[in-house]
Amino acid sequence: MAVKETPGTRASAKKQSSNAPKAASASPGLATKIVVAILVLTAALSYNFIRNAVIDLGLLLGDVQPLSTEGCEVVKGLETCEDIHIHHASGLAFTTCGHAESRKSWFPPIGTVNTSAENAFKDIFVIYDVKSGKYEVMDLIGLPADADRVFHGLDIYERSPTELTIFAVNHRRSGSVIEVLEYTIGDKAVQYKETIKHDLIITPNDIVALGPRSFYVSNDHRHKIGTMREIEETLRRPWSNVIFYSPENVFVAFDNVVSANGMAANKDRSLIILSACHGGSVHVLKPREDHTLEQQDHIKLDFYNDNPSYEPETGDFFIGGHVQPLKMMHDIHTPGKPVAGPSKIVKLHKNPLAETSAAAPRYLVSTVLVDNGQLISTGTVAAIDRKRGVMLVGTAFSEKGLVRCPVPHSA
């Protein structure tokens, strides 16, 4: 309800007469085929498990050498800016930022759930002017003063060219919810409208906005905490999903995902990219008329991918993520230690050969930027404003929360 979560038995037989028909024996050919099939299946499952584990441990890419970081600069004063969305008409980028050390106490997506760590967590809502390079911390008018603000994924729905509805995942200690906010271009504050909570929205991660009160939201786990959460993580179980929400209807739109993470959609919402971070998977999804999601493609990456973003001028998607997630997680769970997480950004773009060749992959992946963690640590998203020649990189657990770069040539 929404609030406006044999063995075979050993047969004995008498000795048959010599002229009785003999029982048919199992075909050696069939038995061999069954054994081979079992071995092939076991090998395939083992390969996938091992491959995914290698990516999650950060063993696939070896030493990380910076690529295309020339001209990148840290935006001072902002930490842990997990997700970024650019309103291209105005040149304003919307993000939420927190505190690197606070994330080590309370951030349910990574299992840090110390509810007594602080009296209140107070992440900030930031609007960054891409052209000028300046930002403002916006007041959130109407949000209860005692409410936790531990923001995660967000998305924007344009009610008009200047009137925006913003959906933001908020991991309150009382339970994770979706905050609905409204903003008019030029205002000095963001207006809180309502909090959405539902039994199916269990572990929300990211959002694709569809209307003023409707959206898709990814659940990154089935279980919030406990033994089953550990089993889900360790065995990489496909138990996460994507939920469709509207005031009239809420249901599972896409399921059987291993760690559903960030999402992004193209301009008309006819295509959605879903990152499944464990094992480096990308699901390319098409919404049906009933709002369920149909998978059109499944792409494997060589790193722990996090949030995708859409660049409207070219129609390409950009995906940020982590090259050495094991090291990153170790630092995250070490109080007082800065998190050093080498980062990578790739471009996902349509393959022109796929139009004439059924054998060609539909999408190609190319590397755009790599950093060893000294400049860009725990990078989660890259949002590109091609008109203004700027790429903004957000980070999840770093004191260098937002990094401004020129758009790399490979982008």
Image (cartoon, helix red, strand yellow):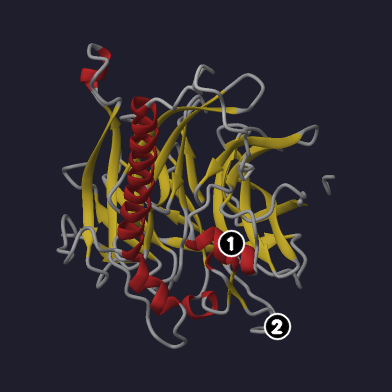
The label on residue 275 is none
Q: Nearer the viewer, residue 287 or 53?
A: 53
State the SS at label 1.
Answer: strand
Q: Which residue is mark 1?
A: 151
Quadrant placement of the N terminus: top right
- Is residue 189 depicted above or below 116 in this figure? above
Per the image, label 2 sits on a secondary structure element best described as loop
**Residue 98 versus residue 285 in the image, above or below:** below
Identity, as a three-letter code, of the amino acid under mark 1:
Phe
Per the model, the C-alpha gap separating discs 2 and 1 is: 16 Å
Residue 376 pos. (x, y %): 29, 66
At horizontal 40% and vertical 41% (from top left) the residue drawn is 282
Badge 2: how crowded within 10 Å, few (<14), some, or many (20+)?
A: few
Task: Kindly give the residue lying farthest to the bottom in the view shown.
Answer: 336
Q: Residues within 10 Å of mark 1 (few under 14, many from 20)?
A: many
In front of the other: 182 or 379: 379
Quarter holding residue 35 = top left
Horizontal side of residue 223 vs 364, given as left or right: right
**Extreme residue in the top direction:** 356
Residue type indicated by callout 2: Asn
**Residue corresponding to mark 2:** 119
Q: Position of residue 391 (x, y in %)?
A: 30, 50
Q: Is residue 138 visible?
A: no
At horizontal 44% and vertical 45% (from top left) the residue drawn is 275
Q: Quadrant of residue 138?
A: bottom right
Question: Which circle's residue, 2 or 1, is located before the other in the chain?
Answer: 2
